[in-house]
Each structure stands twice: as structure tokens, then as C-alpha cells.
Amino acid sequence: MTKGAKLFWGLVILAVIIVVAAVSRAPRSGPSVKELPEGPIKIGFVAPLTGDGAAYGIPIQRAAELALADINQNGGIGKRQLEVVWEDGKCDPKDATAAAQKLINIDRVSAIFGGVCSSETLAMAPLAEAAKVLVVSPSSTSPDLTAAGEFIFRTAPSDAAAGAIAAKYAYDKMGSRKAAVISETKDYTQGLRQVFTAKFKELGGEVVADETFNTGDTDFRTQILKIKNATPDVIYLLPQTPTPGVLLLQQLTSNGVEAKRLTAEVLLVRSVVDENKAQMEGLIGIEQYFDEQNELWQGFIAAYKTRYSEDPPFPSYQANTYSQFYLLKEAVEKVGLNTEKIRDYFLGLKDWKHTLGTITFDSNGDPVGLPYSIKTIAEGELQELEVFRP
């Protein structure tokens, strides 16, 4: 073969390599569901399935399994079955990043449901955004997710609202003027902490102690002593999972701290309340509101109890998860599997009816104007104090 021929064929091979590489990196914005070859539609799901985060990762996965079974038993999506690739994000950015890389580059999914923890979703967002893979989280509430990208959505409200509501309730309704905060060093809890402290100060209150702890810590005596010496009216407890939250409550009591207790949705898990009634008595918490008379909610909870023989321990997050599958089903059957078209379909929704009520996304993929429920544990029972509507 002459040098000219070798050069020619060398250039041809190089061109083929470049084309193949470009195709392998192409975003998931493919043809409509009708144009694709037969076979399942594949999506990813990232949640903490082991460790402390599994306390809500597993229940959320169960809600997903319920929706998946319902959809596939009733014809799938466009007469195609839906397949989910489950990945354990462990409520950790490194594990969530590894999961997202696998789902995007190996499994070639068009959408990822999750993460459950804000740290998971924030870690996945840049990878998904670059590949134009949709991410829809049922429970990540960090304010930082608002600016995470055009393909990043969530069906839970931002802590930018929840933290401010907690501060306002503490100041206006609990009569507190001196607050202490103790929070785990995670994205979710730090988002709530920052919003709460800023709002409480804005209202005229004083944050007299602002303590943190690391995941896995079990001895909080040093932080509690500082809080006790600061003599707050209210303590805002912000664990990432129920286990450290219950330990905090126990140690606050054993160390003689009498300040009122306020918390977020993590400690309102129905099974946790049932198992720790004495330690949780008088605790006030804030979670996403849902109408228990909503027919879609009643259908979901009946099906969930039939399959798993328990009430949903994280009802709003689990109902969000269940609804997301139907949201994706509707979008794909309307506009196909092109992720840019699905994104635009989501952004164009107004008061879409789902298990918790209705949802409308703003331009950042955040749900608009979701109400909150203020609850307390009284005589061992979880009771609603009021509903806050932004």
C-alpha cells in the first residue's frame, strides 16, 4: 500500500472514530415513543437504600415500585413496559455521582427519579444537565437546587419556604425570641438552618446558639451544654434522618434542657412517632400538606397498605414519588422520549392533578405555592395545628 493510500485510509478510520465518539456522547433527546424500537422504556432511580438514609429511601422506593407495577399492569407507557434501574445513592454525593455516571453512560437512561437526599440530587445535577437527562426528585428540598439546571425538577417544595415558615411560626405562634439551632452537616439540613436563622433574625429574634454535628455522631453533650447555657426559648432540630433526631431529643431531656422543640418533616415519620411517644411529646414539626380527602391520595394509601401492610411513613414524599411516574407517563405519551420536549411539557403544566393535590412548575423546575402543615405530637398522637398556604 502506498503512503498516499495509507494516509487516506488512516483519515477514514479517524473520521469513523470521531463520529462514533460523538454519537456515544449525544444527549438523550431521541425520537418519539412510537418511533423507537420495541422494548422497555428505561429510567433510573437513585435513593439511599442502605445506611440511616434507608429509613426513608426504602419507603420511597416502595412507592415507586407500586407505581411501576400499576403502570406496567395497565399497558405501560405507549404500550411499552417501563423498566427502572435502581441505584443506592446512600445519601452521599460520591455514591450519587457514581450512580448517575452509570445510569447516564452505561444504562443510557433518559430520566432519573431522585435523589431522595438533597446531597444526592445536587451531586447528580451537573452530570444530568450536561447530558440532557431529566432529574425529578420527590424529596430534595435544598434551596441550591433552584439553580441546578434546566433539566432538574422536584415535586417537593424548597427549604427557602420551609425554613422561613418555621422561623415565623416560632416567633409569632410559639412566642420565641431566643432560638438555638442544632443541625447535621448535610445539604438539606444546612439549607433549612440558613433560611431559618436569617428569617428569625429579620423578625427581631436572636439566634443564641448555632451548633452542628456530623453524620454518624451519637454523643451530642458538648453541643447540648452550649445550647443549655444560652437559655433559648426554642430549639430547631435538623437531623438528616430520624435516628440522630431521636437521640438528640433523648439527650436534650436527660440534660435538663426545657426549651420548646421545633423540627422539619424528617422527625414526623409516623412509625418513629409511634415508637418514641414519650421523647417526642410536645414536638412541633412542619411538612408538606396533603389533603387526606383527595381521591387520588385515598387510592394510593389503600394500595400501599394492601401491598406493604403499613401506612406510608413519609406520606408526602412517597405520594410525590408515586405521582412522578404518572407525570412521566403522561409526558412521554404526549411528546415522546425527547428530553427537551418533556422538559418543556413539564414547564407548561398548570395545576396538574396528582396524589397530593395539584402541581405547577416555575421556570426553575420548582413547584409553585405548595402549602405546609404544622403538626405536633400531643398525647402520643400526631395532630395538625394549622395549614400554612404561601
Image (cartoon, rainbow, N blue to C red):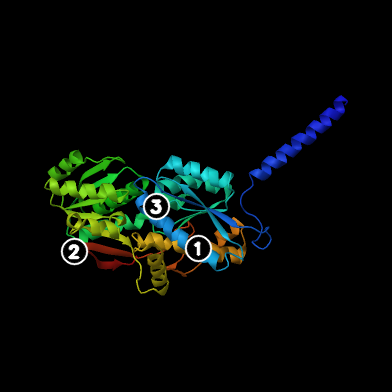
What whole-number distance in Å separates the C-alpha atoms at marks 3 and 2? 27 Å
According to the picture, the residue beneath numbered tag 3 turns out to be: 57
**Number of residues whose C-alpha sits closer than 10 Å to that of mark 1, classed few (under 14), some (14–19) or many (20 or more):** few
Point 54% across, 48% down: residue = 129
Q: Quadrant of the C terminus?
A: bottom left
Q: In the rendered structure, which amino acid carries the disc numbered 1?
A: Ala
Q: Quadrant of residue 286?
A: bottom left
Whichever of callouts 1 and 2 sits on the residue coming sooner in the sequence is 1
Point 62% across, 49% down: residue = 27
Q: Quadrant of residue 228?
A: top left
According to the picture, the residue beneath numbered tag 1 turns out to be: 69
Residue 60 lies, in percent from the top left, at: 41, 57
Count the numbered circles shown.
Answer: 3
Query: In this rendering, would 102 be left or right of 114?
Result: right
Residue 272 lies, in percent from the top left, at: 27, 56
Q: Nearer the viewer, residue 176 or 274?
A: 274
According to the picture, the residue beneath numbered tag 2 turns out to be: 378
Point 36% across, 74% down: residue = 293
**Number of residues whose C-alpha sits closer than 10 Å to that of mark 2, classed few (under 14), some (14–19) or many (20 or more):** some
What whole-number distance in Å separates the C-alpha atoms at marks 1 and 2? 38 Å
Residue 17 lies, in percent from the top left, at: 72, 37
What whole-number distance in Å separates the C-alpha atoms at marks 3 and 1? 18 Å
Whichever of callouts 3 and 1 sits on the residue coming sooner in the sequence is 3
Label 2 sits on a secondary structure element that is: strand
Q: In the rendered structure, which amino acid carries the disc numbered 2?
A: Ala
Label 1 sits on a secondary structure element that is: helix
Q: Quadrant of residue 383?
A: bottom left
Whichever of callouts 3 and 2 sits on the residue coming sooner in the sequence is 3
**Number of residues whose C-alpha sits closer than 10 Å to that of mark 3, classed few (under 14), some (14–19) or many (20 or more):** many
Query: In this rendering, would 320 be left or right of 5?
Result: left
Please say whether residue 332 is visible from this viewpoint: yes
